[in-house]
Amino acid sequence: MRNTMIIGAGEACNMVMKELELSTELDAKICCIIDDNPRKKGSYIHGVKVIGNRDDILSAAEKYQITEIIIAIPSAEKKEQQKILSICQKVPNCELKILPGVYQLVNGEVSVSKLRNVQIEDLLGREPIQITTEKIGRYVSDKVVLVTGGGGSIGSELCRQIAANGVRKLIIFDIYENNAYDIQQELKQKHPNLDLVVLIGSVRNGRKINSVFEKYRPDIVYHAAAHKHVPLMEDSPNEAIKNNVFGTYKVALAADRYKTQKFVLISTDKAVNPTNIMGASKRMCEMIIQLFNNRSNTEYVAVRFGNVLGSNGSVIPLFKKQIEAGGPVTVTHPDIIRYFMTIPEAVSLVLQAGASAKGGEIFVLDMGQPVKIADLAKNLIRLSGYSVGRDIEIQYTGLRPGEKLYEELLMEEEGLQDTENSLIHIGKPIQFDEDEFLKDLEILYKEAYAETGNMKEIVHKIVPTYHLRETDILRDQQIQASWKKEFADTSSNLPSAFLNERITDV
């Protein structure tokens, strides 16, 4: 038998209690109700007393030996829910459950079946990003849409939302066949009438990319294919450049050649003043998009956001595995902070950008206050029913190569412009010498495929905001001097021809 506390003495509480009391299959004993409205204190709902407000949660939990708390305040703002959840987490060995949203009250759908365990997203303390689905629907409706990296965390959610909005044809392009297969089967089941094409291939392969564009002539391209794991790319910088920079270039080149209407790049806050090769590579991707937008009829835009909760390789799945194994939970530094968003929010931003873009913008999401990774770890340990330090230890392992204590969303020079969505802003792209950039890209390609050991220094020459370690500065100066001597006469053409013949597919 579970000793249950319900927080919220409104209609949601009333309906949940009815079902809990009438069901013969549920073993909850409702011991008390908490509500912040002082007028409700001392009243009864189905014979259970409202004993006080949020300040009484911990004492009541101890008095009644509470093992389950149900948050039944779907109309409360996220910030208020987060404050209450922070208190509830202090109750030892207690399972937390929550009603997801007020719309279930409106639809009469409030029931025990709608309860779910509290998730880490509930602790972010802000409202989720909302988009105008009607506008998105009009934008992708009756269009041919290509999603590169369509089997990944962001790519697959893009495909889900695009498929639900009346797309004429959806093309998923991914190098990983298992991921592509999973999203293919899911979409077939949910949207049996969807015209779906799933192709296996690499964005590095220009001939393959061109054949896809020639055959299907996509109206819109969402470019989500990329290497993204910071520590892995620090050890394999050439691969980051080959896949991220030149994969982006080849897809962007095909979009120009085959007259795609819009090209949307998935970027990252790590592109701002990057301290790692992954972030620097994505900054170059943004520069590529800016260059193409200035020289093509296709509209090219970038969408920049922070870490995505629950994505492949993110901290939450790692923490969950570590907790399941009994700990310890590893955090690199006690003060490291990150901006977070959910996968649906990330995709909402991408779709909003595609619908609103005029070309050349970098869209940035206002993600509220950054969150301490250590706090996320502690919250997840508590949500899993354990005590921090007693049941599960947190171990600090030190910052990894290329890792910052904090991430930035914009460079100072970029500034911000508002959009129709108050939580989405536009950064003004920084100007750079495009012809010089084209020359640098050609050299970079040669060096990347020559497997040079100086890749980071070469990238630093192209992206001055990329912060190299002090030990790399001398090597950086030497590589720049050798560049001037070896490539003084290098020339290039417009983007539509650049790398077309001189850079072959490897």
Image: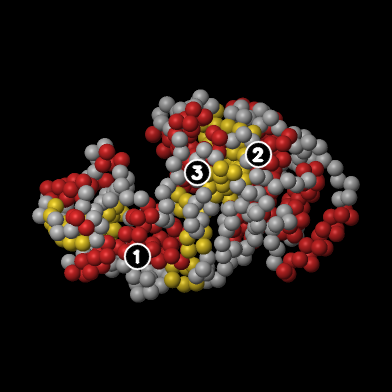
Q: Nearer the viewer, mark 1 or mark 3?
A: 3
Q: Nearer the viewer, mark 3 or mark 2?
A: 3
Identity, as a three-letter code, of the amino acid under mark 2: Gly
Q: Nearer the viewer, mark 1 or mark 2?
A: 2
Identity, as a three-letter code, of the amino acid under mark 3: Ser
Among the two numbered marks 1 and 2 on one chain, the one whose residue lies closer to the N terminus: 2
Q: Nearer the viewer, residue 374 or 134?
A: 134
Q: CA distance from mark 3 to mark 2?
A: 20 Å
- Determine which residue is flagged by label 2: 360
Across and down, in percent, residue 281 comes to: 66, 52
Residue 464 visible to the viewer:
yes
Residue at the (14%, 56%) spot, across then down: 43
Q: Nearer the viewer, residue 411 or 234?
A: 411
Residue at the (63%, 30%) spot, across then down: 260
Residues marked 3 and 2 touching at CB (< 8 Å): no
Q: Nearer the viewer, residue 347 or 369?
A: 369
Identity, as a three-letter code, of the amino acid under mark 1: Arg
Across and down, in percent, residue 11 comes to: 21, 46
Say the numbered circle drawn on residue 73: none
Left or right: 485 in relation to 258: right
Left or right: 28 in relation to 141: left
Across and down, in percent, residue 23 comes to: 14, 48
SS class, disc 3: loop
Q: CA distance from mark 1 to mark 2?
A: 44 Å
- Determine which residue is flagged by label 3: 422
Quarter residue 498 falls in: top right
- Determine which residue is flagged by label 1: 382
Among the two numbered marks 3 and 2 on one chain, the one whose residue lies closer to the N terminus: 2
